[in-house]
Amino acid sequence: MSSSVIRTLGLKKYFSGQTKALDGVDLDVRAGEFIAVMGASGSGKSTLLHLIAGLTRPTSGEVLIEGHDPAGMSDNALTRFRRRRIGLVFQRFNLIPHLTALENIMIPLLAEGKNRKNAIKRASELAGTLGITGQLDQFPDTLSGGEQQRVTLARALSLDPAILLADEPTGNLDSLSSQRICEILDRLCRDEKRIILLVTHEPSVAVWSKRLLILKDGRLIADRPTSDFQDAHHLAAAYQQAVEDRSDKKERKCAE
Ligand code: ADP
C-alpha cells in the first residue's frame, strides 16, 4: 500500500476559544483518492480544507502533507509549497476580471518564474484537457459559470499539484455543468493519480467520489467507500441517517 500523502492527527481548530470548528480529526489520504466531504453548514468542512492548505493554523494537532507540516513553514516557504503541491478551487471563481482566460490560467506559472512561451504552452494544454480551448481569449464575465469554473480548475492544475482541494466547486453551476466538472475531477484522479478533496452538499456530486467523509460539529462521524451506495438517492439517505443517528446518540447520552 502506498503511504499517506495527507495525514491529520488530532486536528483541532477553535475560534475565539468557543467555536469548535474542528474538534479532533484523524485522516489519512493516499495518492489518487477522490474524497467527498459532506456535512451541514458550520460542521467544519471549509476549516478542514483551509487547515490542509495551510491557510490557517491548527489550535492543536497536526497536518502533514507529504511529510511536511505547513504550520511549521515560514510564510514565503508556505506560499511556494502551496502553489506547487496544492491546487485550490472555490465556489466563487476568483478569476481576475481584466485578464483573459488564458492569462488567468498563466498566473501561477508566471509567479513560479516560467517564461511566457512555456506558460502559454502549458495553459493551452490544460485548456485542451478541460475543453475550453475556444474560450481562451475571452474575459471571465463573458464566460458561463461552468466555463469559468473550468478556467479556475486549469489555473489550479497549472503547476501539476498532487492535491486538489475544492470547496463547493459546483455550488454555482447548473446540473449539466456540475456533472461535467465531476467527470473532469474523476478523470484527474483516475488518470493522473491526483488527490481530490471535494466539499459538497450535493449527493449527485458526492456520488462521483470513491470515499465519503461526513463531518458533524467538527468531528468525523463517517468515513465510507462511496461504492456502499447504489446511487445519489441512496447516498443522500445514508447521509441523513448518519447525521440523525449521531444526534439521537447525543440526546440519549444527555438524558442518561
Ligand atoms: P462549513 O464549511 O462546514 O460550513 P466552516 O468550517 O466554515 O463550516 O465553519 C465551522 C465553524 O467555525 C462555524 O461555526 C463557523 O461559524 C466557525 N468559523 C469558521 N471560520 C471562522 C472564523 N474565521 N472566525 C470565527 N469562526 C469561524
Image (tube, rainbow, N blue to C red):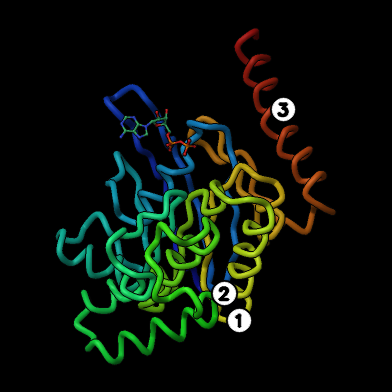
Q: Secondary structure at mark 3?
A: helix
What residue appears at the point 31 percent right and 41 percent down from the top-left corner? 60
Residue located beneath label 2 in the image:
188
Q: Nearer the viewer, residue 81 or 103?
A: 103
- Residue 250, placed above or below residue 97: above
Residue 217 point in image, percent of width and height: 51, 30
- Residue 243, placed above or below residue 29: above
Residue 67 point in image, percent of width and height: 35, 68
The answer to whether 59 appears left or right of 196 in the picture is left
User: Which amino acid type is marked by label 1?
Assistant: Asp
Does label 3 or label 2 sit earlier along the sequence? 2
User: Which amino acid type is marked by label 2?
Assistant: Leu
What residue appears at the point 44 percent right and 39 percent down from the top-left corner? 24
Instruction: Kindly report the distance in space between the C-alpha atoms of the residues bearing marks 2 and 1.
Output: 6 Å
What residue appears at the point 55 percent right and 60 percent down from the top-left corner? 146
Local crowd size for mark 3, using a 10 Å CA cut-off: few (<14), some (14–19), many (≥20): few
- Residue 136, placed above or below residue 203: below
Q: Nearer the viewer, residue 214 or 249?
A: 214
Give ligand 1's quarter of the image: top left
Instruction: Kindly report the distance in space between the C-alpha atoms of the residues bearing marks 3 and 2.
Output: 34 Å
Residue located beneath label 1 in the image:
191
What number is the disc on residue 245? 3
